Amino acid sequence: MNRYTIPWIMLTVMVLFVFGLTYQAKHSSPPDPTYDFYDTAFVHVEIHGSEGIHDLYGRYNHILHGQRVLIKAVEDQQGQYLLEFPVYSPRPAMLYVDDEALEIFLNPGDTTLHIDLWYEASSYSFDSIHFSGNLASVCEYYLEKARKFNRSHIRGLRNTVEANDFARFSASLDSMAAWELGMLAEQEILTELPEWFVGFERNDILYQKAYLKLAQSYNRDIDPTLLDKPPLDNQTAEFSYYYYLYLHTFFSNQVKNEHAADSLEHELEVAYQLASADSLLSGSPHDVFFTRMIFALIQQEKLELAREMLSKFETHFSSKKYFRYLRKCLQDATPVT
């Protein structure tokens, strides 16, 4: 082989290698989401057709803290805004632009979500929206859902469905959920929704329906067949906010029914709930439920009880990152003496 040919072969191989890496990085699917306590989701918003100042902010429910969080946008330059969401898990969120609501989806560490909005000055509204980034298809699904149901879906209505007539209340929720699940199945075929998101959305719909029914049923004489009974230990529901609301309501009702004591001391009620959950939950659902419960104790400044529960169940966490997170929260909350 000609000695002048070898460098060209090596250069060609290197170019093909670099091209292959670039192509793979560009076209490979992002990894499935997970809980991450130390990352942030970034959302870039660009407004076209307007030189005015717009009010942008985001809102979401923190799955571990159980709180509603508001995020104010920062204007980088004319018409370009940045929102930083300190989310610990994949979450739906609402983006408000001059009080117009737009549902989006967040994932810890994701920096790719870019939203282009075209402003229509004559109507003081946005007549065109474009999403790009890893979660674009999910955001487009939410936009189509809002258009199809005119925001009259379970997450949009939440507790506004009348519950005076429980049978009618239950039937309304069942009907709404059936329509939403039908649309999800349709969009799963027509669009490129990630497989993990399809599971997430299905669980979010079913567990919110079950939670709303269960929350309204306590201490009421109702037909038990009207209640939903989704699985308690459901690994595929680990990111669903409503899954944990359902679990909390289920275990709370269980403790009150078993001990027939509405006046049960809070410390005993929490201990009973965690003992029951410990025997019925596993994996991430177990760890997240315990993190929510013990973190709530820290928020309520019941530090001794939080410390006692964390110590009692320390070896029961399937992932030690939750235990370490709670231990740090306790350390930060403990007064320095």
Image (spheres, rainbow, N blue to C red):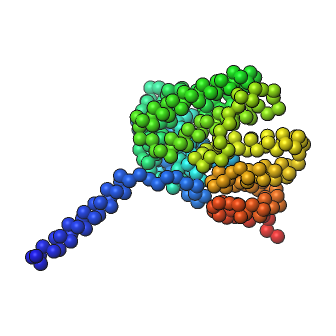
> Which quarter of the figure has residue 168?
top right
Task: Name above or below for residue 239 compared with residue 160.
Answer: below
> Which quarter of the figure has residue 256?
top right
Where does the C terminus fall, quadrant-wise?
bottom right
Q: Residue 245 location in percent, x, y?
A: 69, 42
Kindly tell me whether residue 318 is visible in this rendering.
Answer: yes
Kindly tell me whether residue 79 is visible in this rendering.
Answer: no
Q: Which one is nearer the viewer's eye here, 163 or 114? A: 163
Q: Which one is nearer the viewer's eye here, 313 or 34? A: 313
Q: How many marks?
A: 0
Q: Residue 266 location in percent, x, y?
A: 85, 49
Residue depicted at 75% across the width and 23% down the height: 164
Residue depicted at 81% across the width and 27% down the height: 221
Q: Residue 212 location in percent, x, y?
A: 69, 33
Task: Name above or below for residue 4 compared with residue 54.
Answer: below
Give left or right: position of 275 versus 259: left
Give left or right: position of 128 versus 313: left
Residue depicted at 24% across the width and 63% down the height: 16
Residue depicted at 65% across the width and 42% down the height: 231
Q: Residue 131 location in percent, x, y?
A: 43, 41
| Furthest residue toward bottom | 3
| Furthest residue toward left | 2
Give left or right: position of 260 versus 96: right
